[in-house]
Amino acid sequence: MTYRDAELGVVTVTVNPRARSIIMRPEVDGLRVTAFWGASLAFVRSTIDKFRPSLLAKQTDLKARPQLTTEDVEKMRREAKAHLPRRVDELAHMYGFHYAGLTIRDAKTRWGSCSSRNTISLSLYLMQVPEHLQDYVILHELCHTVHHDHSPRFWALMDTVTDGKAHALRTELHNYHTA
């Protein structure tokens, strides 16, 4: 369902039976909402109203960022496919990690992921962050080939491969956005 909100713009509401809460994603010209099965439109609207100030602030931040053109994204994709596989191989060899495969995707909600089969997926938007943060994300996913969780053992391994800077690098990465 779609409706127009005077402040937020076009609000698109979808229902996901697996959702357990209301998820709101501000966009430059609107708001994308995922609701759980059975959530009424009145409940969704009251939830939006409850978070309206922060949603508007995030929308303002999005509007302030330069918008990427299709050409920009395709150029970044080419750069990512040329650079990231080589860097993943270098870091895997340096620290003794083994992974099954690598894909570069247009992921906008996460920097990377590692499947249960140890296939690593990286966002092409990594090309917008400094190299030391690219390395952090790559090492994060490589560590997931050993520990498929965020347990203390995972973070201990991350600290080993980042000279004890895992949490500081994670905090620094929060200053950047995928798109």
Image (tube, rainbow, N blue to C red):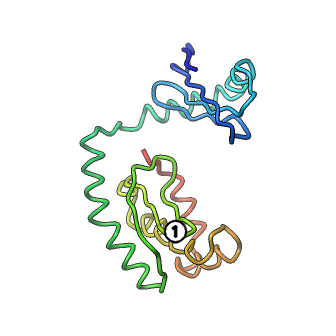
Q: Residue at x 68, y 42 (%)?
A: 18
Q: Which secondary structure, mark 1?
A: helix
Quarter of the figure with the N terminus: top right
Q: Position of residue 36 (x, y in %)?
A: 71, 34
Residue 136 position, x and y percent, is: 48, 68
**What amino acid type is highlighted by mark number 1?**
Glu
Give the percent coordinates (x, y) of residue 29.
46, 25
**Residue at (65% x, 68% y) in the render:** 149
Along the viewing direction, whichever of 98 and 84 lies nearer the viewer? 98
Residue 19 location, x and y as percent?
69, 40
What residue do we see at 51% from left, 71% from top?
118
Rendered position, 67 above or below 97: above
Q: Check disc 1 and report the residue beneath it.
A: 141
Tell me: residue 93, above or below residue 69: below
Please identify the quarter of the rendering in which residue 122 is found.
bottom left
Side of 32 relative to 91 (left or right):
right
Q: How many C-alpha atoms fall within 10 Å of the one at disc 1: few (<14), some, or many (≥20)?
A: many
For the image shown, how many numbered marks are present on the structure? 1
Q: Is residue 113 above or below residue 101?
A: above
Q: Would residue 92 appear left or right of 67 to someone viewing this image?
A: right
Query: Image quadrant for the C terminus?
Result: top left
Please identify the quarter of the rendering in which residue 11 is found.
Answer: top right
Residue at screen point 69% across, 20% down: 45
Whether residue 72 sits left or right of residue 159 in the image: it is left
